[in-house]
Image (cartoon, rainbow, N blue to C red):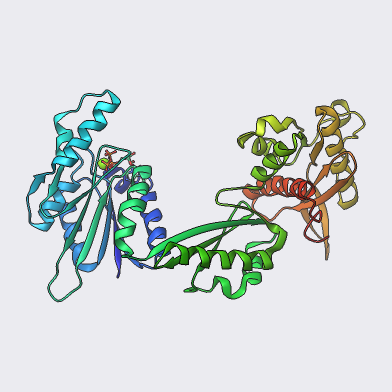
Amino acid sequence: MPAEIIAVGTEIASGAKLDTNSQWLSLRLGEVGIPVRYHTTVADDFDANVEVFRTALQRAEIVLVTGGLGPTQDDLTRQALAQALGVDLVLDDPSLHAIEEMFASRGRPMSASNRLQAMFPRGSSPLPNPVGTAPGIWCSLLRAGEAPAHLAAMPGVPSEMHRMFREQVEPRLTGHSVIRRAVVNCFGFGEAQTEELLGDLTRRGADPEVGITAHEATISLRIIAQGIRQTDCDAKIEGVRRLLAERLGDTIFGVDDEEPEHVVVRELAQRGATVGVCESATRGNLSERLMRVEGGERVLRGGLVLPADAVFSALLDGVPSPPSALNAATGSALAVQLAQAARRRFHTAYGLGVTSLGEVALGGGRTVACAWVAVADGEHTHAAEARSTGNPAIFAPRTSKIALDLLRRRLLGLRPSLDS
Ligand code: ATP
Ligand code: MG
């Protein structure tokens, strides 16, 4: 059941705008086992659109089009599609009504060109758009001696397209089977290490399928289950969750879009507890993460961002400035002092500290850049190392997450770190 994805728009063809729609749609089709054979990009040109649609309807069984459904002169998808199918455009009263309602509810006048958005190639059906004016188009083409081709034309606006695909196109593609997804997030192991621990679970074609993605050192396990009923899918997903818990243990911290800071803010809020931060190498990233989470402003009492060469003692009672070259011993000690200073300075139950950069020896005369992080409460302190992985863009978020994970573990009464 090969598919073709077509992105319509001069802004895309010219390079002014990146085509994220095709990428998103390819990923979604991949999830339901439909291979994508072509990506086509075409400018807002009538003849070119007709040609592209004709070609796609011959060589693919599923054609997904985005863009060009709007009311303006350069939006030509519906007209070009009608031409490619060899049919005329007819008015769909319910769609016209829906568009009129949308304008009325927003108190905006409707222009004559919006009426065009209620016109559809004869024989096609409208895909209602609850979040925009342009309905999408669904049509099927019978082909002699071959399986029919199905085409869905959706709006170019990514949020409108996503919703239309999920609610109306995907169910048409997957027939009667149901698809359920779940995402489990963990922190501590690398991507390759996680894959090794999961073994056959991530095998291609496994049911349910488990995919691994990494984002700034957070590893996400994406579970996709397909079945006749929703309860079958849920049971399959539950089974995978149990296996993941067995193999990844307490590195699992959350689901969906959750990051370690979400867990930390939630746990602190539940206890009515607060946290303060003194950070250097993370350049404010740690405080910002906590601040950005809903409810974060209530648990983060303050964050102090210290440049590497700051005179720490002037800012923080009793904390010496870092020696010119931090090493494993001085680094952990300084991180603990910073975490304790954060508690004192902001009068909080917990403190988090991140040192400036230092180095640890790897043997053979080689060294690796490193920062140290620590958590402190009234009784305990615990420090950890955050080595540079070579990608500077990942260093700050990863280091912040190592610090947050120390606090998460402290709050939940887990072992302080993976290797303890
Ligand atoms: P509308 O009804 O909102 O006018 P449309 O179907 O006419 O939708 P376009 O006018 O082509 O869509 O695009 C609307 C917006 O969506 C523009 O901001 C455009 O840059 C963006 N967009 C269009 N196609 C893509 C794409 N393939 N990837 C990412 N963004 C896109
Ligand atoms: Mg356009």
Residue 57 lies in what quarter of the image? bottom left
Pick the quarter of the image with the N terminus. bottom left
In the picture shown, does residue 317 fall above or below 78? above
Q: Is residue 194 left or right of residue 86?
A: right
Instruction: Say which residue appears at 22% left-offset and 35% top-offset.
Output: 99
Residue sticking out furthest to the right: 318
Percent position (x, y) of residue 187? Answer: 67, 55
User: Percent from the top left, x then y, of residue 393?
Assistant: 62, 47
Asked where in the image residue 34 lies, by quadrant, the reply is: bottom left
Looking at the image, which is closer to me, 347 or 279?
A: 347
- Residue 2, above or below 83: below
Query: Is 344 left, or right, of 197 in this rendering?
Result: right
Question: Which quarter is ligand 1 in?
Answer: top left
Is 343 on the left or on the right of 27, as rendered? right
x and y percent of residue 299 in the render?
Answer: 71, 33
The reply to whether residue 38 is in sight is no
Residue at 53% over, 64% down: 237
Quarter where residue 92 is shown: top left
Nearest to the observer: residue 327 or residue 165: 165
Position of the C terminus by quadrant? bottom right
Q: Is residue 413 visible?
A: yes
Q: Residue at x 52, y 58 (%)?
A: 182
Please state which of residues 340 and 233 is positioned toward the viewer in this rendering.
Answer: 233
Q: x and y percent of residue 401 in the render?
A: 69, 48
At x 64%, y 33%, the residue is 295
